[in-house]
Amino acid sequence: MGVVLEAVNVVRHFGAVKACDDLSVQLQEGQTVGIVGPNGSGKTTFVNIVTGYVKPTGGQIRFKGDSIIGLEPRKIANLGITRSFQVPQLYTSLTILENMLIALSIRSKQQWGFWRPLRSAARLEEASRLLADFGFTDGIDHKASTLPEGGRKLLDVALSFALQPTILLLDEPTSGVSVDDKFAVMDTLMGVVKHSAITAVFIEHDMDVVARYADRVLVFSEGTILADGTSAEVFANPAVRTHVLGEGV
Ligand SMILES: Nc1ncnc2c1ncn2[C@@H]1O[C@H](COP(=O)(O)OP(=O)(O)OP(=O)(O)O)[C@@H](O)[C@H]1O
Ligand SMILES: [Mg+2]
């Protein structure tokens, strides 16, 4: 498996806070990587740096060998690194289908540089197919605002799939989703991810979810990576048990 993304000695300070503190990691093609760690340990900042929303104070990020530091978020998304946010970014007053049609139109503008009809037959078909992959079949003419939180999260990820990513970064895909629905949301999401063989990175606080879906787990602590391995390996690590899982404290 080749390295698709490489972070080298990434630093980001906010005043006295070291959100990322000399963080280095390599991600391989097709991996599903869970990121865990206490509040404020730099998880979102890392995703923000990789996707261009935050500029690092120091260090390097390479995507397929090329530096992406300093590129705008849209440019990075075009290259194939897409993301979701802690709070889904949807047009809630538009329908589920319309949200997807817009996402697809953004991609086609990027690929061909001109505007095509939003509702062309080809695009409607692709939108329906992509939505169906994420479990949206009936009711795609309903407004996105009618979706429960789990549905909003799924739609948000489905929209980022419209850009045909190589790497997908998900910031807490199950936050706000009820305990009963969490695994259903992740089953759908990870089913699509595994099927497409992309590299997926998800930040998650629920260790059961992490253990079930991540091939590899990165444990963040104070802006750096405290442990890196399979979920069994990192959850057996004494430092992780004390500092992150809060055992024996
Ligand atoms: N734009 C910002 N301005 C100032 N401080 C920031 C900013 N963004 C993040 N920080 C600080 O950097 C640290 C890391 O924040 P970050 O959001 O990356 O943590 P996190 O691991 O995602 O936490 P959580 O689990 O709560 O989402 C925190 O102390 C946070 O307050
Ligand atoms: Mg966060």
Image (cartoon, rainbow, N blue to C red):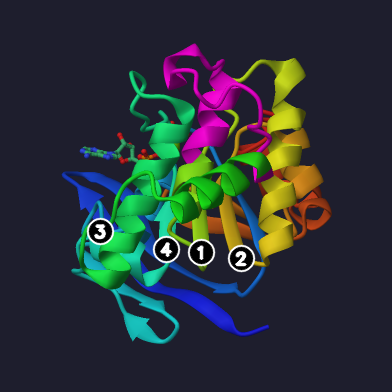
Tag 4, which secondary structure? strand
Q: Residues within 10 Å of mark 4 (few under 14, many from 20)?
A: many
Tag 3, which secondary structure? helix
Amino acid on which disc 4 is placed: Ile
Amino acid on which disc 3 is placed: Arg
Taking 1 as reference, is 4 left or right?
left
Judge: label 4 CB < 8 Å from ligand 1: no
Q: Which is nearer the N-term, disc 2 or disc 3?
A: 3
Taking 51 as reference, is 73 left or right?
left
Q: Is residue 85 visible?
A: no
Numbered circle sitting on residue 81 = 4
In the picture of the structure, the residue carrying the numbered disc 2 is 198
- Pointer 1 with pointer 4, Cβ within 8 A: yes
Judge: label 2 CB < 8 Å from ligand 2: no
In the picture of the structure, the residue carrying the numbered disc 3 is 74
Q: Which is nearer the N-term, disc 4 or disc 3?
A: 3
- Pointer 1 with pointer 3, Cβ within 8 A: no
71 part of magenta stretch: no
Amino acid on which disc 2 is placed: Ile
- Quadrant containing the C terminus is top right
- Pointer 4 with pointer 3, Cβ within 8 A: no
Q: CA distance from mark 1 to mark 3?
A: 14 Å
- Pointer 4 with pointer 2, Cβ within 8 A: no
* Residue range (magenta): 133-156
Residue 237 at x, y = what percent? 75, 52
Numbered circle sitting on residue 167 = 1
